[in-house]
Image (cartoon, rainbow, N blue to C red):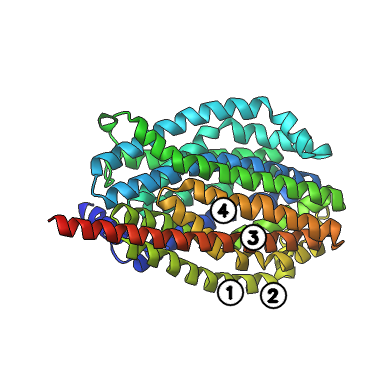
Amino acid sequence: MAKQKNSNIEMITGDPKKAIIKLALPMMVSMLLIMMYNIADSIWVAGLGADALAAVGFITPLFMVLVGLGNGIGAGANSLIARNIGAKNIEQANNAGLHAIVLSIIVSVIFTILIEVFMVPILQFMGAGNTIQYAMDYSYVIFGFLFIFVYSGVASAIFRSEGDMRRATIAIAVTAIMNIILDPIFIYVLKFGIAGAAWATVISAILSCLVMSYWIWGKKDLYLDLSPKNFNYSGQIMLDTLQVAIPSTLENIVFSALAIIINSMLVLAAGTTAVAVYTASMRIVQLAMIPLIGIGTAVLTVAGVAYGAHNYENLQTAHSYSIRIGFVVSILLGAVMFIFSGQIAGMFAYTQASAGLASEIATAISVLSLFVLAIPHGIMSSMMFQGVGKGVYSLLITLLRSLILESIFAYLFCFIFGWGLPGIYGGVVFGCFVGGTVGYIWAKFFIRKFKQISIRKYTSHENSS
């Protein structure tokens, strides 16, 4: 195992191109499994009718916030641990991992109380209407176990930060496979209905957390040593973690806010059925984005190590290379979505209650296939900023791209230009591309400045010695 630990560290500190591929591929598998069980949720829930599927659409933005809590703290820990590994400060890397776990406990308790108390007003504000009972049945279970999802995101990020993608992937596989198995059992066999989908997700996540906890504190064979004796409270570590964690979490809130805004436009344009159509279509878009998210997550770790080691060449290579392969992958996946939109839509129309949605879902998928082509340069730039600890920069890019530009163009295309539902889809695509382009230009300026600073420091060190 010691040999495996060393090879992981050598990998993330070596050739950034090889590191991105080796880190990204397992992450893609992980994300694929996650999306498979998300799609499984939608497909099984679709059998209960359009109202049930729309209810999942209303809860999804809130669930993104839930997942964002764990992923945000995990991103902060991943960035800080990677930077300390790059700087060869293992003691601080251990302490950073422990701080992230403590932070996950504190945050979970606070947000569980807040979300459970204000669930009904939130759903009413979102316009859930006659789907509100379905949404409540689903949400109270999911949000009641918030800690499980937050801790899972943090623990998985700790494994990724030291290049151990194998076990991070296995843990996610446990969640995904168990959820896919349990969904139909809880929904239809046990007749729990939409709440059954929530219970299947919670139980699956608990099993994954138990597996990761055993590796961390039972087997104790990580490169990092997360024994409680290594915890030494540091306000600076908390601050450094939160500098990435808070913006990263807020990014998920931005995505949730965008989803709420888009859902509201859809309701105004065509009623709650349009929300069901958009929910199903975005599940497919998110599935197609898995490779891009996998590459971006790899960039976070590689960029953090390069930044900690003051290696501007690796940072520059990681950013440029990830965008190139991102565009190649997105072109292929976008084409598949467009060509097979009809067949894909059929997966959501297998019962009499949902049969009427097929043609509308196919249209939505055809337009939204362009979304995966619009996002690579933006997402890679955001993840690079998270990796170097500039979470606020990543947040600003996301705010511009999603909350501002996607919302504005969706409104303009639908209501001002009169393009209807396709206008909302097209506005989301166009806004994403424009915002991502701004983020890409900003990232290039940042890397150029970092290069100049690194060269000056290196020259100064050479002269002094």
Write down the residue under mark 4. Answer: 397
Cβ atoms at labels 1 and 4 below 8 Å apart? no
In-image side of 166 versus 267 (left or right): left
Q: CA distance from mark 2 to mark 3?
A: 22 Å
Residue located at (52% from left, 63% from top): 441
Could you tell me the amino acid type at mark 2?
Ile
Cβ atoms at labels 2 and 3 below 8 Å apart? no
Foreground label between 2 and 3: 3
Foreground label between 4 and 3: 4
Residue located at (51% from left, 45% from top): 248
Q: Is residue 259 above or below residue 126?
A: below
Q: CA distance from mark 2 to mark 1?
A: 11 Å
Cβ atoms at labels 4 and 3 below 8 Å apart? no
Residue 120 image point, x, y percent? 73, 29
10 Å crowding of disc 2: few (<14), some (14-19), many (20+): few
Write down the residue under mark 1. Answer: 332
| Residue 319 image label | none
Pointer 4 or 3: first along the chain: 4
Foreground label between 1 and 4: 4
Write down the residue under mark 2. Answer: 339
Q: Quadrant of residue 100?
A: top left
Residue located at (47% from left, 50% from top): 172
Write down the residue under mark 3. Answer: 432
Pointer 2 or 3: first along the chain: 2
Q: CA distance from mark 4 to mark 2?
A: 31 Å
Residue 39 appears in the figure: no
Cβ atoms at labels 1 and 3 below 8 Å apart? no
Could you tell me the amino acid type at mark 1?
Leu
